[in-house]
Amino acid sequence: MAKYTGPVCRLCRREGCKLFLKGDRCFSEKCGLNKHPNAPGMHGAGRKKPSPYSIQLREKQKAKRIYGLTEKQFHKYYTMAEKMRGNTGENMLILIERRLDNVIYRMGVGVSRAQARQIVNHGHVTVNGKRVNIPSYLIKADDVVAIKESKQSNTLFTELKESKLGKGVAWLEFDNAQLSGKIVRLPVRDDIDMAIAEHMIVELYSK
């Protein structure tokens, strides 16, 4: 599956819930889902009752779109989680939550995961003092994630220094002055605030 480059509000409408893909706009009256609550397309308002398979598929699509992953990337995390001890669905979400681009978003550096991914891709981020430009890099406990000192003079980051701390994530400590965050512990399922029924995704992939 290629990267989606169309209007992201259309994705929220298709899933029937806010995926928070456009930062603060999602919390305002300009949110596309508020204006057009029906699914996109001429038959969006009159869709038939979904089948069990359709419900499972929509749950997978919703999770993929929240984190901005392709099918290949998403299935990779399922395969990794399947080989781990414990609940496969929870392990899968925790692995995705540990992605570097998601950590940057959780720190509050990016208004959306798409912007956070761009910040990582452009080489603005360091992990334990070393530059990392791979969004899928998995952080570990006690890692220190920071914005490079040479990039902190950018307008985006200078404004962040004057803003409030992070996004209130229990497993992450964020220092505004240094634009750095320390991974206090690895996230657990209760730390993931999105309404995702991961067991449905596991059932879909298990068929």
Image: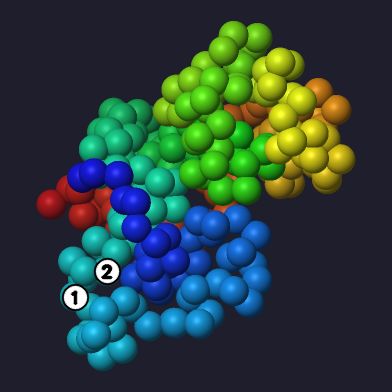
Which residue is at the front of the view, 14 or 185?
Answer: 14
The picture quadrant where one finds residue 60 is: bottom left
So how many labels did they put on this image? Answer: 2
The secondary element bearing badge 2 is classed as helix
Amino acid type of the residue that numbered disc 1 sits on in the rendered structure: Ser
Label pair 1/2, CB-CB below 8 angstroms: yes
Q: Is residue 21 above or below residue 121?
A: below
Q: Residue at point 65% right, 60% down?
A: 24
Q: Which mark is residue 151?
A: none
Residue extending farthest to the bottom is 46
Question: Circle 2 is placed at which residue position?
Answer: 55
Question: Circle 1 is placed at which residue position?
Answer: 51
Q: Position of residue 41 (x, y in %)?
A: 26, 79
Which residue is at the front of the view, 110 or 16?
Answer: 110
The picture quadrant where one finds residue 157 is: top right
Q: Residue at point 29% right, 64% down?
A: 58
Does residue 126 appear left or right of residue 152 in this picture?
Answer: left
